[in-house]
Amino acid sequence: DTGVSQNPRHKITKRGQNVTFRCDPISEHNRLYWYRQTLGQGPEFLTYFQNEAQLEKSRLLSDRFSAERPKGSFSTLEIQRTEQGDSAMYLCASSLLAGTTDTQYFGPGTRLTVL
Amino acid sequence: GQNIDQPTEMTATEGAIVQINCTYQTSGFNGLFWYQQHAAEAPTFLSYNVLDGLEEKGRFSSFLSRSKGYSYLLLKELQMKDSASYLCASLDSNYQLIWGAGTKLIIKP
């Protein structure tokens, strides 16, 4: 296993369109996170899963955003009716929560541009 | 509230040493992480501290003081490839990472 992968790497869309991103975590990892990052800022938490259960979703997250992890393996993040403010890098990370250690490993990200 | 503070930008010279500081206030604490992020790339894991003291890993070392809510990342023998943003993140009581905005490190020849 070579790490976390994300597809696509880049996505350009028009305002109002729906987009879907995919994340494949490291295979033995039980936790999967989605973040959004804009220039000059740290990652902003969106949501996370432990196995197939979505345990938390950011209160700042609009209802236009939804994420799934149906079989506890890969995950998808969908943004409906995209807006220009959604333009950002979308990062996925996975981890193996074991005891009190939970190191997150990131995928390469999907850069979204909304025109 | 939860807060992570680190300098926005630092400049250092190739071959020198630089220390990047981070102070944190989070709901509960399960450790402090440092990540490196090159421009337009994803963060990569550098270090994890949960106990007080210094952890050394090659040219990079990370220090933690839990009582002071303080950490630093020390980079020695700086190389041009060390030019990047360095992100400090605290793992809170829910095992979620609370991130700083990152410190952009500029290395000059």
Image (cartoon, rainbow, N blue to C red):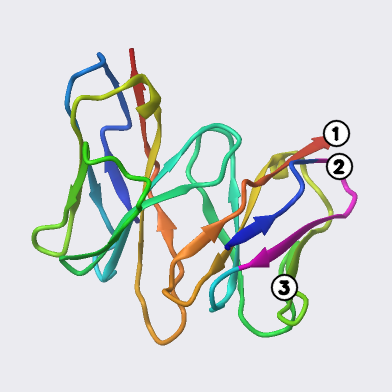
Give the letter of the chain under mark 3: B
Depth check: A62 or A47 in front? Answer: A62
In the rendered image, residue B45, in percent from the top left (x then y), is placed at: 54, 59
* Amino acid at pointer 1: Lys
Mark 1 / mark 2, whichever is N-terminal:
2
Quarter-of-image position of residue A90:
top left
Nearest to viewer (mark 2 / mark 3): 3
Q: Nearer the viewer, residue B101 or B109?
A: B101
The x, y position of residue A31, in whole percent, is 30, 67
- Assess disc 1: are there few (<14), some (14-19) or many (≥20) residues with their C-alpha within 10 Å of its C-alpha: few
Q: Residue B13: within the magenta?
A: yes
Q: Which mark is residue B69?
A: 3
In the image, taking residue A89 as reference, residue A47 lies left or right, namely left
Q: Which residues are magenta?
A: B10-25
Q: Residue A60, percent across and down? A: 37, 46
Q: How many marks?
A: 3
Q: Are marks 1 and 2 in contact (CB under 8 Å)?
A: yes
Secondary structure of residue under mark 3: loop
Indicate the amino acid at tag 3.
Answer: Gly
Dot placed on the residue nearer the N-terminal end, 2 or 3: 2
Horizontal side, residue A100 vs residue A94: left or right: right
Identify the main secondary structure in magenta: strand
For the residues beneath circles 1 and 2, the answer to whether they share a chain is: yes
Residue pointed to by mark 2 = B14
Residue found 33% across the figure and 53% down from its top: A4
Mark whose residue sits in front, 1 or 3: 3
Q: CA distance from mark 2 to mark 3?
A: 30 Å
Point out residue B104 in the picture as x, y percentages from the top left corner.
71, 40
Determine which residue is flagged by label 1: B108
Q: Eyeballing the image, is B94 above or below B59? A: below
Q: Chain of mark 1?
A: B
